[in-house]
Image (spheres, rainbow, N blue to C red):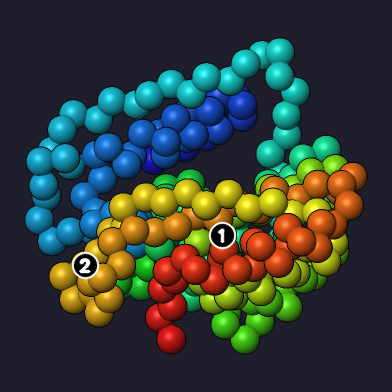
Amino acid sequence: HYINILLKKKKTTDIEFYYLKACLISSLSKYSNITGIFRAYLKEFNWVSNQELKINKIFVPRWLKWKAIKWDAEKHKSKADIVYIDPPYNEHQYSPNYHILNHIHEERNELNWIAWVYDYSDTKSNFCNEEWSKKWVKKLLKNVKAKHILFSYNNNWLIRIWDLYDMLSKYWNTEVKIISYPRYRAHWERTPHLNENYEYLFICNVWKKINKTKYNENIKLLKKYPWYNRR
């Protein structure tokens, strides 16, 4: 709120305004009174949220030319040397899960008085819909023109990981790297035997020919890894 007042009183430029907001948002995770995602607050303040707020600076190199664009990836074509794609992989929409950060950024006032969540119907993603996710990934891939593509996905998927690999391999020579890390588990979790999450990083190269032998090996490899689906 104070940062917005500075802008309204013309005590800061637009660039300084967005830089201050970015620094604030990037620092919040160390002080937030939340369970892990920015969906709701805890009933009581914990020791983390009682600390003095210190805003970290974000390093932005002056020599680097870059542009941040907010648009619907399903409707716009992307052309670059390298494209990184990290779509939602399960039914949980990003908007409600991170609405507190969105509220700080946009200062929305139309909050629901029960859960303090604003109406996010205009930002719902088709990638979070089991029926539509595969269709929209195919549409997204057709809009990408790049020499190299990095596509990230997770074992909590809506699209079966070997099906996703098959989709990517139809367009490009695709390698896969599998990274494991500890999985957060709530006390009510129905699958206590799964202690790890797996991040799948697909590396797509336009210039290499598709290797059928390697393709079959990767399909078998992906089917061996444990997966977690809420269905």
Identify the residue shown where x is 73% and y is 78%: 135
Residue 7 in percent (x, y) is at 52, 31
Identify the residue shown where x is 57% and y is 82%: 130
Q: Secondary structure at mark 2?
A: loop
Residue 198 in percent (x, y) is at 45, 57
Where 172 falls versus 229 (above or below)? Answer: above
The numbered mark at residue 153 is: 1
The numbered mark at residue 186 is: 2
User: For the residue marked with disc 1, what is the amino acid?
Assistant: Tyr
Residue 148 in percent (x, y) is at 79, 44
Quadrant showing the N terminus: top left
Quadrant showing the C terminus: bottom left
Decide which of tag 2 and tag 1 comes sooner along the chain. Answer: 1
Q: As drawn, which residue projects farthest toward the top? A: 63
Residue 26 is left or right of residue 126, and the answer is left
Q: As drawn, which residue projects farthest toward the front? A: 213
For mark 2, does the 10 Å Cα neighbourhood hold few (<14), some (14 to 19), or many (20 or more) residues?
A: few
Residue sitting nearer the eye, 5 or 14: 14
Whether residue 165 is visible here, answered yes or no, is no
Where 191 falls versus 196 (above or below)? Answer: below
Residue sitting nearer the eye, 151 or 25: 151
Whether residue 216 is visible here, answered yes or no, is yes
Residue 43 in percent (x, y) is at 13, 61
Residue 184 is left or right of residue 228, and the answer is left
Q: Secondary structure at mark 1?
A: strand
Residue sitting nearer the eye, 221 or 55: 221
Identify the residue shown where x is 24% and y is 39%: 31
The numbered mark at residue 1 is: none
Callout count = 2
Residue 171 is left or right of residue 128, and the answer is right
Residue 131 is left or right of residue 40, and the answer is right
